[in-house]
Amino acid sequence: MKRFSLNSATTKGWPLPELVAGCAAAGVTGVGLWREEVQEYGVRRAAALVGDAGLTVTSLCRGGFFQQDGWLDDNRRAIDEAAALGAPALVLVSGGLPPGSRDVDAARAHVGDALGALVPHALDAGVQLAVEPLHPMFCSDRCVVATLGQALDLAEPYPAAAVGVVVDTYHVWWDDAVWAQIARAGAAGRIACFQVADWVTPLPAGVLLGRGLPGAGCVELRRFREAVDAAGYAGPVEVEVFDAALWERPGADVLAEALAGYLTHVA
Amino acid sequence: MKRFSLNSATTKGWPLPELVAGCAAAGVTGVGLWREEVQEYGVRRAAALVGDAGLTVTSLCRGGFFQQDGWLDDNRRAIDEAAALGAPALVLVSGGLPPGSRDVDAARAHVGDALGALVPHALDAGVQLAVEPLHPMFCSDRCVVATLGQALDLAEPYPAAAVGVVVDTYHVWWDDAVWAQIARAGAAGRIACFQVADWVTPLPAGVLLGRGLPGAGCVELRRFREAVDAAGYAGPVEVEVFDAALWERPGADVLAEALAGYLTHVA
């Protein structure tokens, strides 16, 4: 229970003050936040709101999208926002192929260069960049980093304090190499964030919003939690589920269901 | 041009006699066929139709789905059908998780056992079983074999004459390990079939029918063709595109477009 963290994407549309109050009322002590909602509310004000309720920010989502104009300044700002919130990790979704490009090798090499450019600022700020491998179905348009092994290869040139990885069960469950890569990530001190969502089919059009709360799908969630634990990770477990149907429901109900699913299928 | 083969899934709904006549008229010498249409037309009658037109059957799709009742007998029949058509390879889509199961390791182990059970019959018939890794987005409900490396691991215990793999650009393009695995597959004589389709987003609901003709998407198709060639493969190049919009169009038009895309982006 005390490792559970609610990523606010699960209850999108629940206003930040209500989300914070709802988490506190439910005994939840961690939240993963998104930049848009934090910026809208005000970064310092959000930090105070969360801190006054006795919560900690377990991660800030998200930086990355390194193929877009202005990526360097935008990611530096994201690091600053994470630091202001006291979030230990900034989740990075690295972006897909540039428009018209077929050169996935070049796009991946650019991610490595972008990480290098951000490392000094991340170290100064005390924020670990968390490279998130996304499911390969997002490779062309959202994230060219498609496996945990690839994320670790990209992180490897840099200190672990500066560059880690996200282990998100939704994105990596299909990969038979993932268990060895989790062990590798843990040994290197690079598990920056552990996120949980379940795999559900059929996938909806656009494939972004078809995830399931823990227990709704086919992923061996507890096996993943045990694997990150065995690799030395003792941090929060964020439930992060993108599901448009959940966003229609009261935030407190979704939180209660996420928590129940976590306790039954993950903890 | 002479390596081009039309997989009939690209022009689904084009009746077999018209497809065969259309291919012959276009100078196409190879077709990949599906069991349903062959059974409906009659296996011997289909073999005669294709042979009389001077075409060869480059593969038969598909066996597999090893978690379904009756899989053993059904796959033996599929091998016999491939042999009757003179198809060198039977494409296997191995099936997803059994209903209610989360045990992907067990499902994968069962694929290996199923291959072993089919090997003697495949050798007798002179048909190479072609294990097809499908894109990881199909892992739960269609094919637990998600990478080329995994397909080769499953094939490895058996003679190459009995068990090979399919390299389908649509399914493996995102995988940074694929180039090494293509070399491995070629060195072992296990490239049973090379299929080409392009990756297009956004994906449609269900994600099955959103593929693109060669050149419509972001895959480095020529690089794949050169890689299988460099690995020693000199067989047909099947254009196999599942796209519901193509099925609304006249088969001959789709064939012409597939051929043009192949010549421009693959050959």
Image (cartoon, coloured by chain):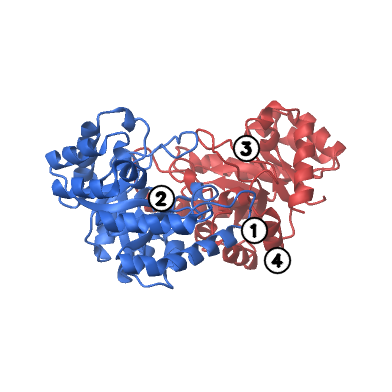
Chain colours: A blue, B red
**Is B141 rendered above or below residue A4?**
above
Residues at marks 2 and 4 touching, judged by CB atoms closer than 8 Å: no
Determine which residue is flagged by label 3.
B242
C-alpha span from label 2 to label 1: 29 Å
- Label 2: which residue? A171
Residue A173, given in percent of the width and then of the height, sits at 38, 51
Q: Chain of mark 2?
A: A
Q: Callout 2: 10 Å neighbours few (<14), some, many (20+)?
A: many
Q: Which residue is mark 1?
A: B191
**Is label 2 on the same chain as label 1?**
no
Residue under label 4:
B230
Q: Quadrant of residue A92?
A: bottom left
Spatial CA distance of label 2 from label 3 is 24 Å
Discs 1, 3 touching: Cβ within 8 Å: no
Please state which amino acid type lies under the numbered disc 2: His
Labels 1 and 3: the sequence-earlier one: 1
Estimate the spatial distance between the alpha carbons at disc 1 and disc 3, rounded to whole Å.
22 Å
**Within-10-Å neighbours for mark 1: few <14, some 14–19, many 20+:** many
Name the residue at 28% across, 65% down: A231
Q: Secondary structure at mark 4?
A: helix
> Which mark lies nearer to you, 1 or 3?
3
State the residue in front, A139 or A183: A139
Instruction: Provide residue A6's location: percent of width, then percent of height.
Output: 25, 44
Q: Is residue A25 visible?
A: yes
The amino acid type of the residue labelled 4 equals Ala
